[in-house]
Amino acid sequence: MSEQTFTFEQVAISLDDRSYDIHIGQGLLSRAETWAHLPKAQTAVIVTNETIAPLYEATLRRAIATHFKQIETVVLPDGEAHKDWQTLQLIFDALLSKGCDRKTVLLALGGGVIGDMTGFAAASYMRGVPFVQVPTTLLSQVDSSVGGKTAINHPLGKNMIGAFYQPVRVVCDLNTLATLPPRELSAGLAEVIKYGPIADMAFLQWIEAHIDDLMRQDPQALAHAVKRSCEIKAEVVGQDEREAGLRAILNFGHTFGHAIEAGLGFGVWLHGEAVGCGMVMAAELSCRLGRVDAAFVARLRALIERAGLPVRGPVIDASDNAGHYLAHMRLDKKAIAGDIQFVVIDGPGKATVCGAPDALVRAVIDDCCA
Ligand code: NAD
Ligand code: GLY
């Protein structure tokens, strides 16, 4: 791409002194300009994993070479099953053994697992060092890299140990999506679809019209999906950074989804798959609570299916499947004294948080699981 034709988009996250920009475009990773005006530091540490390192680490290292005297790389094992204390410790081990000071800049090169763990490491290393999100999956470009939620999993629950800690920049290079396996692309589409029913029915309609383009990775369709998703998330996070209220709507489908992920064991279903199916279950619950009609649920289910995602939940425990889901959901971060709080659709394009009788939730789980 020539210098004259190069374009990229920016979406601003407005959070007082924690404000930053999301850069979205093709080929951003290799452009030295992308990395200008980062906090001044001697050292940068790229945190990535064994799958992504051979694909993009060298490109990133070359691009930032003029900005940092020392560049180190930490390569973690790949997968949701490694989003844990042991793997987090590998980041701290590397930072300390390389003599990294409190100005060191961390760069999270990878999907949501790398982004969440690097963010948590940045939040806590020497009580906080700057970090940049360089998301390389669709899911991380449209959701996890934005908004400052960082965490690791606990065997008993998803993302249970973490911190709110904002990056100083997010760099979404759309070209990195070209190497993404189809199953991971679908997982990312779950979080794109999420923004429609909770906030923007015109966007939902656009996704319905372009789902085939998105599935075959049409660059323009992907660029629009990433930008619009980031705009919606920026709007929500700008109003409620620490999830005092509104931000919970971004968890539509996640209460059921997290129960699937933790119940099956982390990594069996992808996060996006669990969220996709969880949205069908949450929409069904919304319908039984009288908030949307059955046609709305059918419409959402059809789109999720077209995105290549599962629409029926797994049976985790044949003896009492609903009880198993409920036990996991009582540990959800939104639960209050064991009372599960669900994100429900409160009319198309609008979401709210509410409780629901156990019997109703049991019926939804029974009817929505294979
Ligand atoms: P992931 O990080 O596990 O990445 C998916 C897979 O794709 C991995 O195997 C990874 O190595 C590989 N990969 C990444 N980029 C690639 C590329 N360009 N080419 C080829 N392979 C590539 O999964 P994810 O879906 O990106 O993220 C899921 C995680 O994000 C979950 O842990 C979830 O809890 C978290 N999350 C966090 C937030 C938040 O706000 N912090 C929001 C949503 C999800
Ligand atoms: N992905 C949910 C949130 O960022 O709040």
Image: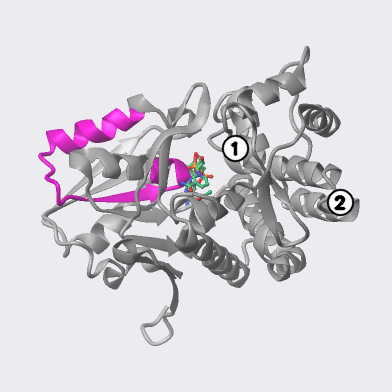
Residue 75 appears left or right of 27: left
Q: Which contiguous range is marked in magenta?
A: 87-116
**Residue 325 highlighted magenta (yes or no):** no
Q: Tell me the tag on residue 270.
A: 1
Is mark 2 in CB contact (under 8 Å) with mark 1?
no
Q: CA distance from mark 2 to mark 1?
A: 23 Å
Task: Give the quadrant of the C terminus.
Answer: top right
Q: Position of residue 343 (x, y in %)?
A: 67, 46
Q: Is the residue marked by circle 1 packed among few (<14), some (14-19), or many (20+) residues within 10 Å?
A: many
Q: Depth check: give the residue in front, 265 or 125.
A: 125
Residue 58 point in image, percent of width and height: 29, 53
- The amino acid at mark 1 is Leu
Seen in the picture, residue 213 relative to 164 is either above or below; the reply is: below
Q: Is residue 107 magenta?
A: yes
Q: Secondary structure at mark 2?
A: helix
Which residue does the image show at 44% across and 80% down from the upper left?
A: 7
Residue 267 image offset from top left, x and y in percent: 55, 30
| Residue 185 showing in the rendered view | no
- Disc 2 designates what residue? 298
**Which residue lies most toward the top here?**
319
Residue at 35 percent of width and 35 percent of height: 76
The percent position of residue 246, horizontal first and vertical second, equals: 56, 55
| Residue 265 relative to residue 363: left or right | left
Quadrant in which the N terminus appears:
bottom left
Say left or right for 38 vs 359. left
Is residue 329 something one can see in this rendering?
A: yes
Q: Which image quadrant for residue 280?
A: top right
Tell me if mark 2 has few (under 14), some (14-19) or many (20+) residues whose alpha carbon lies within 10 angstroms of its own. some
Name the residue located 77 percent from the left edge and 61 percent from the top edge.
348
Mark carried by residue 206: none
Name the residue type under label 2.
Ala
In the displayed structure, 319 sits above or below 328; it is: above
